[in-house]
Image (tube, rainbow, N blue to C red):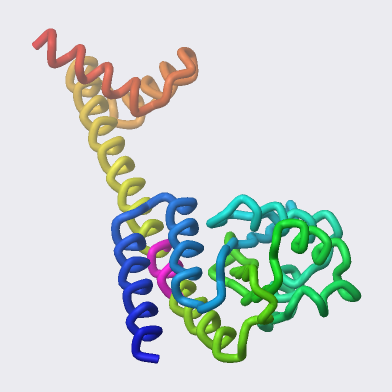
């Protein structure tokens, strides 16, 4: 038991490092799959099913065979990962008991040597909802403790992904605000030069910049920046 707890701790520490140092969603989800295999005994492969308006897809996987088994579920429109995502409940089974419910999934899984399956619902936000799927080559059907471990792991992953996405969204907003402030500053500078040079009002100066932007199909900020650059060079 101590060894298992140590493995879980190490896996979560590794995942935390990825969340802190990686901005790409695909890289993060691949790490989630890799660490899930470490966390749950009997798991040999992992994948993440993402569901949106276009349907279900495999967003990450630790082994291409896992993706192939997922795709059999998507094609059939049903399967344990889709059931977990739809119901919000964990699905745990041995392949011998899955043929009646999901024959296409069971056939594909058996062809790729899968004997056991475990799926937990994953609901991060509006852009990522689906399931974390684990595949075992043995016919143990996973155990109740395995399901609890995956449930705990999924909860931590969900929290981490939400936090990371909020942080990334905040950074993106800060970048947009910084760009907007820079744009405003250069536009005001261009207006000031026009007002001083041509003895016109702020409204008239702005209209000249807008007209130039429309005639040349160049963004207003770039028109202002070019104008300021030329004025500085001439000065």
147 above or below 185?
A: below
Residue at image coords 61%, 50%? 64
135 above or below 31?
A: below
Main SS class of the magenta portion in the image: helix
Q: Using residue 155 as the reference point, say whether residue 171 is left or right of it.
A: left
163 in the magenta segment:
yes
Residue at image coords 46%, 62%? 34
Is residue 133 in view from this perspective? Answer: yes
22 above or below 41?
A: above
Residue at image coords 86%, 61%? 104
Q: Using residue 103 as the reference point, say whether residue 9 is left or right of it.
A: left
- In the displayed image of the protein, which residue is found farthest to the left? 235
Quarter assignment of residue 170 = bottom left
Which quadrant is the N terminus positioned in? bottom left
Which quadrant is the C terminus positioned in? top left
Residue 207 percent across, percent down from the top left? 40, 25
Q: Using residue 213 as the reference point, say whether residue 227 is left or right of it.
A: left
Residue 117 percent across, percent down from the top left? 68, 73
Q: Which is more toward the observer, 123 or 189?
A: 123
Residue 47 percent across, percent down from the top left? 59, 61
Residue 218 percent across, percent down from the top left? 43, 19
Q: Using residue 57 as the reference point, say whether residue 190 is left or right of it.
A: left
What is the span of residues highlighted in magenta in the rendered image? 159-165
Quarter assignment of residue 81 = bottom right
Residue at image coords 74%, 68%? 82
């Amino acid at each position: 038991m101590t060894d298992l707890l140590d493995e879980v701790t190490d896996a979560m520490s590794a995942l935390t490092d990825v969340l802190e140092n990686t901005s790409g969603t695909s890289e993060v989800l691949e790490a989630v799959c890799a660490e899930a295999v470490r966390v749950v005994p009997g798991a040999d492969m992992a994948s993440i099913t993402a569901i949106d308006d276009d349907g279900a897809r495999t967003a990450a996987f630790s082994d291409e065979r896992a993706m192939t088994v997922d795709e059999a579920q998507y094609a059939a429109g049903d399967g344990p990962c889709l059931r977990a995502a739809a119901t919000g409940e964990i699905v745990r089974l041995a392949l011998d008991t899955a043929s009646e419910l999901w024959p296409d999934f069971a056939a594909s899984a058996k062809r790729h040597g899968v004997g056991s399956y475990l799926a937990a619902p994953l609901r991060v936000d509006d852009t990522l909802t689906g399931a974390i799927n684990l595949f075992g080559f043995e016919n143990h059907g996973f155990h109740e403790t395995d399901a609890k471990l995956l449930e705990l792991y999924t909860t931590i992953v969900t929290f981490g992904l939400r936090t990371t996405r909020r942080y990334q969204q905040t950074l993106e907003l800060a970048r947009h605000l910084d760009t907007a402030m820079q744009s405003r500053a250069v536009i005001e500078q261009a207006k000031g030069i026009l007002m001083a040079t041509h003895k016109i009002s702020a409204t008239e100066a702005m209209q000249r910049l807008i007209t130039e932007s429309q005639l040349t199909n160049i963004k207003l900020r770039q028109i202002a920046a070019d104008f300021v650059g030329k004025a500085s060079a001439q000065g």
